[in-house]
Image (cartoon, rainbow, N blue to C red):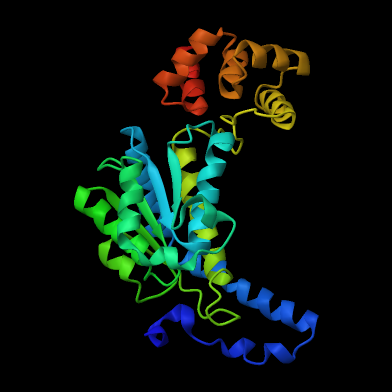
């Protein structure tokens, strides 16, 4: 059965890699890795269409849920876990589910992906509903854990997406959004943590980042909604306020503290010389976009 999977084909470029020296080996790997962003680039319209549905779900109070097994599952959990500190969102907003649960994050539990009912149960455990979006991540596209979850989500009427590096992915049969990253055979046959994993990481970066940008979590190219949970991020927050407004460090620190340590609110406070309550009101009216607040302010002058 594996013979028909793109992810299980032998790569002629690396056919004799075991006879190479270290530099030759890493050169082969690097040359193959260069093919990954090209493959992802070919499906940008499909990625963008999924982003649009994710943003629409967020605006309705829905969530983005990634589900996968092994490397794919770990990548989903990683992307989800980075969203709260980077964009100041609730941990509930973007979630990652992995076959085998938390134990599978640090050690391989290969058999966990064989249970379709486990994927369904994991969705039930988080009260997954029709307003949420489910993105199944699986290199080969055959993991029952992911397939069961995608079918369950589809039956609920939820938006579904599937990321796979195999043209015969069964996940594509139950997904609205088909994201096929054709990266070709792996350097080490079947080792999908390599090119396939890299492609999945690139796509997940795009899905979460583009969605958050569309929600106003980024101003220009600055992460103005970050959560300053440590000293480094406090310093970064104050630097952000200075970068955007041109104010002094002292003014930035004062606004930062007065805003409840929320950089975006502090920026609006300084830009428009308003208090915290007014800044919050203006941002709410502008759907969280500083650029829209600025535009409205210019119209009013």
Residue 94 visible in this rendered orientation of the protein? yes
Q: Residue at x 25, y 54 (%)?
A: 152
Residue 26, above or below 68: below
Q: Going 54% across and 43% down the picture, which residue do you hit?
A: 81
- Residues 221 and 111: in front is 111
Image coordinates of residue 123 in percent, x first then y, are 33, 48
Give residue 280's position: percent from left, percent from top.
48, 15
In the displayed structure, 174 sits above or below 259; it is below
Is residue 205 shown to the viewer in this render? no
**Foreground residue, 261 or 286?**
261
Placement of the N terminus among the 4 image quadrants: bottom left
- The x, y position of residue 96, in whole percent, is 46, 48
User: Number of numbered discs present?
Assistant: 0
In the displayed structure, 127 sits above or below 289; it is below
Q: Which of 133 and 292 is in front in this view?
A: 133
Kindly identify the residue that appears in the image at 21 percent across and 48 percent down: 156
Tell whether 56 sits left or right of 11.
Answer: left
Q: What residue is shown at x 49% (from left), y 32% (from top)?
A: 89
- Where is residue 200 shown, x and y percent of the image? 50, 61
Which of the 4 image quadrants contains residue 228? Answer: top right
The reply, left or right, for residue 75 in relation to residue 140 is right
Q: In this view, does 53 lie to the left or right of 269?
A: left
Which quarter of the picture shows residue 111?
bottom left
Horizontal side, residue 137 vs residue 17: left or right: left
């Amino acid at each position: 059965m594996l013979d028909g999977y793109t992810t299980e084909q032998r790569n002629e470029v690396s056919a004799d890699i075991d006879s190479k020296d270290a530099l030759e080996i890493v050169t082969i790997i690097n040359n193959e890795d260069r093919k990954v962003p090209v493959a992802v680039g070919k499906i940008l319209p499909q990625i963008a269409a999924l982003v649009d549905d994710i943003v629409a779900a967020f605006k309705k109070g829905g969530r983005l849920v990634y589900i996968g097994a092994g490397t794919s599952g770990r990548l989903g959990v990683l992307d989800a876990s980075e969203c709260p500190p980077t964009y100041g969102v609730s941990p509930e907003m973007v979630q990652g589910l992995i076959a085998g649960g938390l134990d599978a994050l640090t050690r391989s539990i290969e058999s966990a992906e064989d249970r379709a009912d486990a994927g369904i149960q994991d969705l039930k455990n988080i009260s997954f509903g029709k307003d949420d979006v489910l993105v199944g991540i699986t290199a080969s596209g055959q993991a029952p854990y992911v397939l069961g979850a995608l079918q369950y989500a589809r039956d609920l009427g939820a938006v579904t997406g599937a990321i796979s590096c195999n043209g015969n992915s069964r996940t594509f049969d139950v997904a609205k959004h088909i994201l096929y990253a054709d990266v070709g055979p792996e350097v080490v046959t079947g080792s999908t943590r390599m090119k396939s994993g890299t492609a999945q990481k690139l796509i997940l970066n795009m899905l979460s980042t583009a969605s958050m940008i569309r929600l106003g979590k980024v101003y220009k190219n600055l992460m103005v909604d970050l959560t300053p949970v440590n000293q480094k991020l406090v310093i970064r927050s104050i630097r952000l306020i200075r970068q955007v407004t041109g104010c002094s460090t002292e003014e930035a620190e004062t606004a930062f503290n007065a805003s409840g340590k929320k950089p975006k609110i502090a920026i609006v406070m300084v830009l428009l010389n308003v208090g915290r309550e007014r800044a919050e009101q203006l941002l709410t009216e502008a759907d969280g976009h500083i650029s829209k607040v600025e535009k409205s302010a210019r119209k009013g002058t």
